[in-house]
Image (cartoon, rainbow, N blue to C red):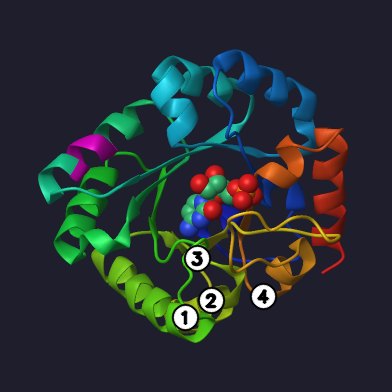
Amino acid sequence: MSNDVMTGVANQNDDMLNRLMVALDVDSSDAALQMRDRLGDSVGWLKVGLRLFVAEGPALVRDLNQSHRVFLDLKFHDIPNTVAQAVESAGGLGVNMINVHAGGGSEMLNAAAQAAVAFPDMRLIAVTVLTSDAMPKEQARVVALERAKMAQDAGLDGVVCSVFEAAAIKTACGSDFITVTPGIRWGGQDVQDQKRVADPASAIAGGSDFLVVGRPILHALDPRQAALEALSLMRSA
Ligand code: C5P
């Protein structure tokens, strides 16, 4: 991966592969490793969320990290000291990205950022507003922007936001500030519980550095083909 992508510059020439994250929202190591093998080199990143981490823990994360970059999506939200300690533990796993919830406030974000300094290869980002939140788009944009600025002031590397907020966050926080966007759907796919969804090309054009895709790839008859389809749409932006 180029340094540009790791620092968050949305460069059209970067290989889109390194900007596609598949959410491994499955319930066991077997299912996760099987999906990893099916996807192979069609994606650069795997995202491990609550379901899988609670079920299988650090051993699986270390295993996935052998073949792909790993985003540990546990959205820490607790008192500052506890979050800082969790960030240290996550850093010890060797993952390339972790997140905390910006709703935890600036003191918590500061503590998390300080703990992350010891892990220069790990990006620390903050969740702004969940893409499943029913908040009206305009309001979501205002809250996401406020939280993005708070995260930047605290020393975080970027945020998780919806595609609809990515451009405003880039304008306010600068192009180096990473935007990671879930809520990606294309070709008439079911939006499920997501509220603010966008297709892969719009996400790239809208200022997203990393696209998180779960069910549209996990539930596809051919997950690798679905990942390649997402990549091709990203490249068309
Ligand atoms: O299946 P789908 O593509 O909707 O999955 C989106 C993934 O992104 C899920 O793993 C979800 O937990 C995660 N996520 C999200 N919204 C956020 C942060 C993370 O949907 N704000």
Q: How far apart are marks 1 and 2 (CA)?
A: 5 Å
Q: In which quarter of the image is the C terminus?
A: bottom right
The percent coordinates of residue 91 (x first, y second) are 34, 34
Q: What residue type is labelled 3?
A: Cys
Decide if ligand 1 comes within 8 Å of the CB at mark 2.
no
Q: Which amino acid does label 4 sit on?
A: Gly
- Residue 44 drawn above or below residue 199: above
Local SS, label 4: loop
Mark 3 or 1, nearer chain start:
1
Give the mark toward the camera: 4 or 1.
1
Q: Tell me the residue that label 2 is attached to.
A: 165
Q: How far apart are marks 3 and 2 (CA)?
A: 6 Å
Q: Which amino acid does label 1 sit on?
A: Arg
Snapshot quadrant of residue 164:
bottom right
Snapshot quadrant of residue 215:
top right
Q: Is residue 223 on the magenta stretch? A: no
What segment carries the magenta color?
83-87
Q: Tell me the residue that label 4 is attached to.
A: 206
**Between 87 and 49, which is closer to the camera in this rendering?**
49
**Between 123 and 150, which is closer to the camera in this rendering?**
150
Q: Distance between the residues labelled 3 and 1?
A: 9 Å
Q: Which residue is drawn at 53% across and 73% down?
A: 175
Image side of residue 122 versus residue 14, left or right: left
Mark 3 or 4, nearer chain start:
3
Q: Tell me the residue that label 1 is attached to.
A: 141
Give the mark toward the camera: 3 or 4.
3
Mark 4 or 1, nearer chain start:
1
Q: Tell me the residue that label 3 is attached to.
A: 161
Q: Distance between the residues labelled 4 and 1?
A: 13 Å
Decide if ligand 1 comes within 8 Å of the CB at mark 3.
yes
Disc 3, disc 1: CB below 8 Å? Answer: no
